Image: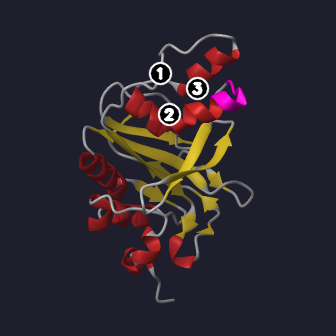
Amino acid sequence: CRAAIVAVRSLGYVGVGAVEFLLDPDGDFWFVELTPSLQVEHAITECVSGYDLVRLQLLVSEGGSLPMPGPPPIRGHAIEVRVCAEDPAYAWLPVAGTLHRFAVPDVAGSFRPLAQPGLRLDSGVVDGSVVGAHQNSMMAKLVAWAPTRQEAARMLASALARARLHGVVTNRDLLVRVLRHPAFAAGDVDTGFLDRHPEVFAPLLSSV
């Protein structure tokens, strides 16, 4: 947070933005970019902070001030997955078609910070939606917020496994396997996770 604040102040930046860093194996982190927009993962920040970032963005754009003097305290742990119309078994090939059923169980809310731990679903599709070839493959974001990381991962995997997603191929099964993998549970996660654990793909591979 301190490094992000230094970066935006040095630029005189006002508004919502995401300051991104890359953490290396030695524990050092490096500036990557400042994105002047809400990120796809902003729901994570909303869950663990309790603040509505869209509301704050409008507040600042109207000349208002943030309601907190510095970084807010973090509440529990949140994990987000992107449910996409794509086939991980075939080089993440995007898939088009009609989504006949899209239902995720135990959702507590959508498009707003949650008042208590649970599942948040931000979805751009409903039953009968047509997933076309000229749009992003992401259909929805599902977020689990819980007191511990283990509880959040367990809650998220369970909801995904029981979700009814019919009509197009999705990355749902791969997401469930990653969330339930021992290395993920231990926090041994970086950008090389899928390369080191090809077994998460094995059940997805087709014999055709």
Judge left or right: residue 203 versus residue 69. left
Disc number at residue 70? 1
* Residue 181 shows in the view: no
Which-is-in-front pick, marks 2 and 1? 2
**Residue lying farthest right?**
134
**Residue lying farthest bottom?**
207
Disc number at residue 193? none
Of the image marks 2 and 1, the number of the one nearer the N terminus: 2
Assign a secondary structure to mark 1: loop
Contact, CB < 8 Å: mark 2 with mark 1? no
Q: Amino acid at mark 1?
A: Gly
Q: Is residue 130 magenta?
A: no
Q: Amino acid at mark 2?
A: Arg
Is 129 drawn above or below residue 76 in the view shown?
below
Of the image marks 2 and 3, the number of the one nearer the N terminus: 2
Judge left or right: residue 6 versus residue 29. right
Camera-nearest residue between 37 and 8 = 8
> Residue 49 lies in what quarter of the image?
top left
Where residue 26 sits: x, y (%)?
Answer: 42, 61
Residue located beneath label 3 in the image: 54
Disc number at residue 2? 2
Question: Which class describes the residues within 10 Å of circle 1: few (<14), some (14-19), or many (20+)?
Answer: few
Is 137 drawn above or below residue 197 in the view shown?
above
Assign a secondary structure to mark 2: helix
Residue positioned 39% across, 75% down in the render: 197
Camera-nearest residue between 135 and 42 = 42
Question: Which class describes the residues within 10 Å of circle 2: few (<14), some (14-19), or many (20+)?
Answer: few
Contact, CB < 8 Å: mark 1 with mark 3? no
Residue positioned 56% across, 55% down in the render: 99
Q: Which residues are magenta?
A: 9-14
